[in-house]
């Protein structure tokens, strides 16, 4: 006689299965949120115990600089990887939707807010009446701020046109303006410092934006033989970019912190503390990049390299946020 007892319910019965990738998405969103909070919350712990005064609106300026750097990275990375993809003979014609117009819009708004702060003597304006737009033409910082505003505006117009590649020129102008802004004429050898910053910022933008667009492209090329080839091309370019980043970063740090004072300034100044955090983050990113390269060359499926590459691009986003904070902190005194 067969039993009519209903089957026992398991512990997981009645639960809705979680969509694949949900945990990874939540983790990425959490890290992005942390990266966005770094510029806002960073100045307080960085300045604690250093005896240095926080300039008005440091957190806001750091956040705006972060947006500016990200707005440079996205289109430059798309131009780089797009060119690499066109060099592959078997590359599929499909390309992900460009984010360049959105990046240019975000950069334009951020540059406009920065220009309004410069127009009030580098103070946060209380009202629109405090902003002296005409005064921007009377100072070096004001002219550079206007150049960045116009550069992002021109880049956005180019990005929405049929010849989107032309946006490289206004983006180059923005990069030059940012490099000049970071090194005032009163600084020791300002042109040398601007040159180092120009190379450093360009390489960083190409690395961050290029990796982001490469991963987006590979998602649309599922199963295509050109996928691993594109990732391999980008990995070789990224190795050169990392070498240039390291060299220019070390030279820039030595210019602002002489060798005999580095150990002390890395712990006793806000600039040194944030710089140390950036160095550690970049080292972690380099390890992730090496892990992805090993998988690309040795794994049975080269596209398994995308997993550490995704972690790498998130970590690079945090590095961009830390870099934005670094630009808003007082430069250490050259002892």
Image (cartoon, grey):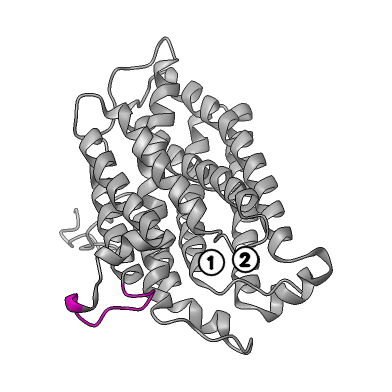
Q: Quadrant of the C terminus?
A: bottom right
**Depicted 156 relative to depicted 17: above or below:** above
Please say if the residues under marks 1 and 2 sit with CB atoms less than 8 Å apart. yes
Position of residue 128 measured from the top left corner of the image (x, y, whole percent)? 18, 75
Q: Which residue is drawn at 62% across and 53% down?
A: 193
Write down the quadrant of residue 165 in the picture.
top left
Q: Which residue is drawn at 48% across and 58% down?
A: 181
Which numbered marker is on residue 326?
1
Position of residue 140 measured from the top left corner of the image (x, y, whole percent)? 43, 59
Whichever of labels 1 and 2 marks the residue nearer the N terminus, that label is 2
Q: Is residue 216 magenta?
A: no
Position of residue 250 measured from the top left corner of the image (x, y, whole percent)? 71, 53
Any part of residue 216 in sight:
no
- Name the dominant secondary structure of the magenta segment: loop
Say left or right for 312 vs 79: right
Q: Residue at x 45, y 23 (%)?
A: 84
Q: Nearer the viewer, residue 318 or 311?
A: 318
Q: Nearer the viewer, residue 92 or 184?
A: 184
Q: Which of 98 and 293 is in front in this view?
A: 98
The local crowd at label 2, few if under 14, some if 14 to 19, many if 20 or more residues have their Cα within 10 Å, is many
Residue matched to label 2 = 275
Q: Magenta stretch?
A: 120-129
């Amino acid at each position: 006689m067969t039993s009519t007892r209903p089957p026992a319910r398991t512990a997981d019965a009645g639960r809705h299965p979680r969509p694949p990738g949900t945990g990874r998405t939540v983790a990425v969103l959490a890290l992005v949120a942390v990266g966005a909070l770094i510029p806002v919350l960073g100045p307080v712990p960085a300045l604690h115990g250093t005896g240095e005064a926080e300039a008005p609106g440091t957190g806001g300026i750091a956040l705006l600089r972060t947006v500016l750097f990200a707005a440079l990275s996205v289109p430059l990375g798309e131009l780089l990887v797009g060119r690499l993809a066109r060099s592959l003979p078997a590359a599929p014609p499909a390309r992900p939707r460009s984010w360049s117009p959105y990046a240019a819009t975000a950069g334009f708004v951020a540059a406009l807010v920065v220009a309004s702060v410069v127009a009030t003597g580098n103070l946060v304006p209380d009202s629109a009446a405090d902003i002296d737009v005409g005064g921007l033409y009377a100072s070096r910082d004001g002219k550079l701020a206007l150049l960045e505003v116009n550069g992002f505006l021109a880049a956005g117009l180019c990005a929405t046109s049929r010849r989107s590649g032309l946006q490289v020129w206004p983006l180059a102008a923005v990069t030059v303006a940012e490099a000049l802004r970071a090194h005032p004429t009163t600084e020791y050898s300002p042109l040398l410092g601007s040159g180092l910053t120009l190379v450093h910022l360009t390489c960083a933008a190409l690395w961050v934006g290029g990796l982001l667009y490469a991963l987006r492209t590979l998602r649309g090329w599922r199963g295509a033989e050109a996928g691993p080839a594109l990732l391999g091309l980008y990995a070789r370019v990224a190795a050169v970019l990392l070498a240039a980043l390291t060299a220019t970063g070390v030279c820039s740090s030595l210019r602002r912190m002489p060798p005999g004072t580095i150990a002390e300034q890395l712990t006793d100044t806000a600039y040194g503390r944030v710089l140390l955090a950036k160095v550690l983050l970049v080292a972690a990113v380099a390890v992730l990049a090496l892990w992805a390269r090993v998988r690309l060359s040795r794994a049975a499926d080269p596209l398994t390299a995308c997993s550490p590459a995704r972690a790498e691009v998130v970590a690079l986003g945090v590095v961009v946020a830390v870099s934005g904070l670094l630009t808003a902190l007082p430069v250490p005194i050259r002892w």
